[in-house]
Image: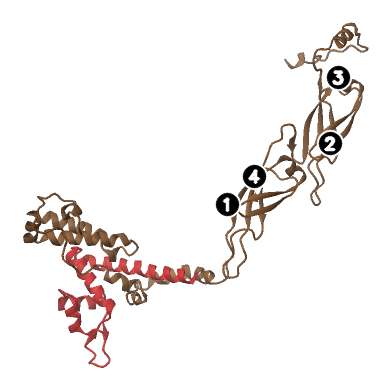
Chain colours: A red, B brown
């Protein structure tokens, strides 16, 4: 589990408003910590890397915030296909 | 990142900061490892492009590089492509594809996945085999050498023709997980014979005979695919006369009877013969007849 503090420390240049908006839009998923109050989000390793990717897409690659959902949706589909194909390959 | 950073970005040394940024974005979008999960080479390319950009985007470092004070080695940067390792693994399910698509996919490939995990029949293998004329008439066992050095004995039934495909059960690729092996499919090419012709299940041969044999009749020996046959020619057998030898064509197979052998006589006069010429000069035919009678009607 990765707390908000650690998330900000690990993802350079992450803005709290961006994070809140992306969580609300579903670009990034957040879990709730059962030991803390329900409002405190916690994250997984994949979320850290996904946030780095989103920032790279928006800022370094200059994809633009509007194009983010399109790119992320296509990426999710590609990776879903790759995972499923690998399962099939392992089954065969 | 030892290459010239200008070259890596496809720029000249007088490129403006805007041009550097634009070139970098174009290449970075193209090669970002997380956007190219199936292309490992994209990662190296992206790294080179990023390093070149980081160096040239910093005016101070760019100037020092241009003056030759530092080389093209960029400082260590966080490697891109961190998302890919998670998204490709089981954790990637956290970011599915929104549902609809994955269902279709699971449905489409689920059946195949189940089939793939169980016993599966091996592949069929295709081969070609040249069959001698006699083997196609009488039936035979021909040996087929496979590319992998194996040898298959192929039983050729009588009556096969060019283009026919024989199926040898279980002689193809091996089965998977206890499944049956595939079949060997063998396409046949039947060789022509210099004298015999196939006509379905019948054989045809032009049989040369001497003038004497044709006029007087004779017992002649005829070589056939099944061996030499002794054939009695009736007296007065003209050119074109057909002699049918029942059952001497393509061999019988199952309920199919054997074909016939048709001999078509062709009188051969042979080399000049003084005695024959002398005889014919004095010869008066018993029943003079014009063999060309009736030809006029066709003109």
Q: Earlier in the sequence, mark 2 or mark 1?
A: 1
Q: Looking at this rendering, what residue extends furthest in the top direction?
A: B282
Q: CA distance from mark 1 to mark 3?
A: 54 Å
Q: CA distance from mark 2 to mark 1?
A: 38 Å
Q: Nearer the viewer, mark 3 or mark 2?
A: 2
Q: CA distance from mark 2 to mark 4?
A: 29 Å
Q: Earlier in the sequence, mark 1 or mark 4?
A: 1
Q: Residue at x 23, y 85 (%)?
A: A41
Marks 1, 4 in one chain: yes
Q: Which residue is mark 1?
A: B147
Q: CA distance from mark 1 to mark 4?
A: 21 Å
For label 4, the crowd category at 10 Å Cα-Cα, with few meaning under 14, some 14 to 19 and many 20 or more, is few
Q: Which residue is mark 3?
A: B211
Q: Chain of mark 2?
A: B
Q: Chain of mark 3?
A: B
Occupied quadrant, residue B100: bottom left
Q: Position of residue B242 (x, y in %)?
A: 83, 29
Q: Looking at this rendering, what residue extends furthest in the right direction?
A: B286
Q: Which residue is mark 2?
A: B228
Q: Earlier in the sequence, mark 2 or mark 4?
A: 4
For label 1, the crowd category at 10 Å Cα-Cα, with few meaning under 14, some 14 to 19 and many 20 or more, is few
Q: Nearer the viewer, mark 1 or mark 4?
A: 1
Q: Earlier in the sequence, mark 1 or mark 3?
A: 1
Specify the label residue B257 is tagged with.
none
Q: CA distance from mark 3 to mark 2?
A: 22 Å
The reply, left or right, for residue B170 in relation to residue B19 is right
Marks 2, 4 in one chain: yes
Q: Which residue is mark 4?
A: B163
Query: Along the line of sight, which residue is nearer the eye, B289 or B33?
Result: B33
Q: Nearer the viewer, mark 2 or mark 4?
A: 2
Q: Position of residue A77 (x, y in %)?
A: 35, 68
């Amino acid at each position: 589990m990765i707390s908000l503090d650690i998330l900000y420390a690990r993802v350079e240049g992450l803005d709290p408003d961006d994070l809140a908006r992306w969580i609300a839009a579903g670009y990034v998923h957040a879990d709730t910590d059962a030991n803390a109050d329900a409002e405190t989000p916690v994250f997984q390793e994949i979320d850290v890397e996904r946030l780095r990717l989103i920032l790279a897409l928006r800022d370094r690659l200059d994809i633009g915030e509007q194009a983010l959902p399109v790119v992320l949706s296509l990426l999710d589909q590609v990776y879903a296909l790759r995972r499923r194909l690998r399962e099939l390959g392992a089954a065969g | 990142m030892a290459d010239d950073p200008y070259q890596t970005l496809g720029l000249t040394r007088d490129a403006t900061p805007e041009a550097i940024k634009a070139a970098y974005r174009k290449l970075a979008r193209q090669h970002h490892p997380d956007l190219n999960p199936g292309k490992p080479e994209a990662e190296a390319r992206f790294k080179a492009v990023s390093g070149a950009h980081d160096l040239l985007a910093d005016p101070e470092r760019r100037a020092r590089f241009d003056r030759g004070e530092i080389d093209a080695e960029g400082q260590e940067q966080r490697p891109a492509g961190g998302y890919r390792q998670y998204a490709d693994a089981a954790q990637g399910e956290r970011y599915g594809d929104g549902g609809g698509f994955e269902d279709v996919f699971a449905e489409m490939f689920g059946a195949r996945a189940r089939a793939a995990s169980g016993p599966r029949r091996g592949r069929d293998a295709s081969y070609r085999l040249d069959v001698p004329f006699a083997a196609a008439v009488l039936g035979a066992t021909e040996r087929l050498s496979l590319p992998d050095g194996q040898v298959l004995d192929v039983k050729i039934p009588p009556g096969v023709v060019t283009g026919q495909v024989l199926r040898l059960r279980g002689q193809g690729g091996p089965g998977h997980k206890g499944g049956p092996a595939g079949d060997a499919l063998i396409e046949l090419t039947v060789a022509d014979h210099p004298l015999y012709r196939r006509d379905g299940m019948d054989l045809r041969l032009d049989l040369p005979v001497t003038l004497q044999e044709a006029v007087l009749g004779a017992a002649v020996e005829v070589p056939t695919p099944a061996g030499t046959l002794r054939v009695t020619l009736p007296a007065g057998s003209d050119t074109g006369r057909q002699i049918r030898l029942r059952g001497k064509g393509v061999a019988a197979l199952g309920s199919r009877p054997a074909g016939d052998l048709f001999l078509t006589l062709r009188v051969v006069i042979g080399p000049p013969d003084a005695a024959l010429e002398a005889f014919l000069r004095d010869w008066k035919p018993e029943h003079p007849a014009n063999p060309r009678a009736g030809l006029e009607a066709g003109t």
